[in-house]
Amino acid sequence: MDNRQKLEKIERADRARRIAVKTATYLLLTFWALVVLFPFYWMVLSSVKSYSAYNSEYIPQLFTLSPTLQNYVDAFTTVPLARYFSNTIVFTVGTTALMLLVTVLAAYAFARLNFRGNSLVFTLFLSLMMIPNELVVITNYVTITNMDLRNTFTGLILPSVTSVFYIYLLKENFEQVPDQLYYAAKVDGTSDLKYLWKVMMPICKPTIVTITILKAIECWNSYVWPRLVTDDELYFLVSNGIQEIRESGFGRENIPAMMAAVVVISVPLIALFLVFRKAIMAGVSRGGTKG
């Protein structure tokens, strides 16, 4: 009986310890989630406050009893936010599509085509990741300027259609596909492009979806390169467009409308991530695991 009581006491203590650890973990995660999400809440809250109500608050209020959507109307009518939005869509879709084409073909070539110097070429290719981005930006700027492509969508898109990291990620995923499938396809007379389209891409779909979404997010948030090669407002993206709105005085005078504009350009990325978050996690974990 004494041993049984001791065992029960130990089990109760262990159970209490696990409950305490789990409770502390959830409390910490909840606190951290509130810290992370509060700026988004404040952004949305500010965007639905009227201009007069916002300016009359000597102490910022954490809620409002009279929300309004007028700020969203002002964001589209007072400044050319719709144009910035459409420019960003063109830039994001064009860049992502070309990048996906280049990445898939390059990754397949490195993973499946046995040409002389494959390993050496890929090693040299990976070494490009060691070059600082600042040097690449300077070189690209000089090239685009010499080609007279400033203030054009071509100049915006071309320098961003390749990614060493995405090619490496997809190559590692392609190499996980058994070689027997490739040999069987070649015996049946299947071409490399058909094998890539019918076999490799469906099997590696999670990784392809992942790099597509990550590239789209990268393009949508792009700031430095569009700021360098565009000084014509007709080609501004949402990133440098918002900066232009702030510098013009509208964003400084009408903070609620500025917050409404920021909410509008943030919603697509948030929705994209929420819809495809499982695919992103699965693609990254699968692409980085061999065997």
Image: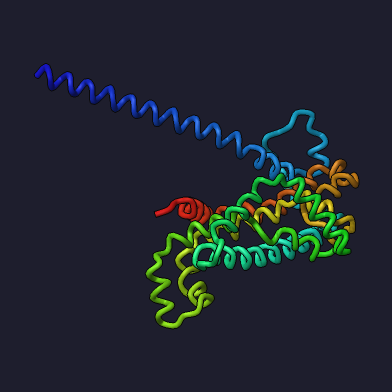
**Residue 164's image quarter?**
bottom right
- Judge whether 30 appears above or below 234 on screen: above
* Residue occupying the point 76% across, 45% down: 134
Above-or-below relation of 267 to 205: above
Against 22, residue 146 (above or below) is below
Instruction: Locate residue 32, reporting x and y percent.
Output: 55, 33
Q: Is residue 43 left or right of residue 118?
A: right
Place of residue 113 in the rendered image (x, y in percent of width and height, measured from the top left):
51, 68
Residue drawn at (84%, 58%) of the image: 80
Residue 290 left/right relative to 67? left
How is the model colour-coded? rainbow
- Residue 256 in the image: x percent, y percent? 78, 44
Q: Is residue 22 above or below residue 270?
A: above
Give the camera-side residue of 173 and 61.
173
- Residue found 57% across the figure and 56% down from its top: 120
Q: Quadrant of residue 81?
A: bottom right
Position of the N terminus by quadrant: top left
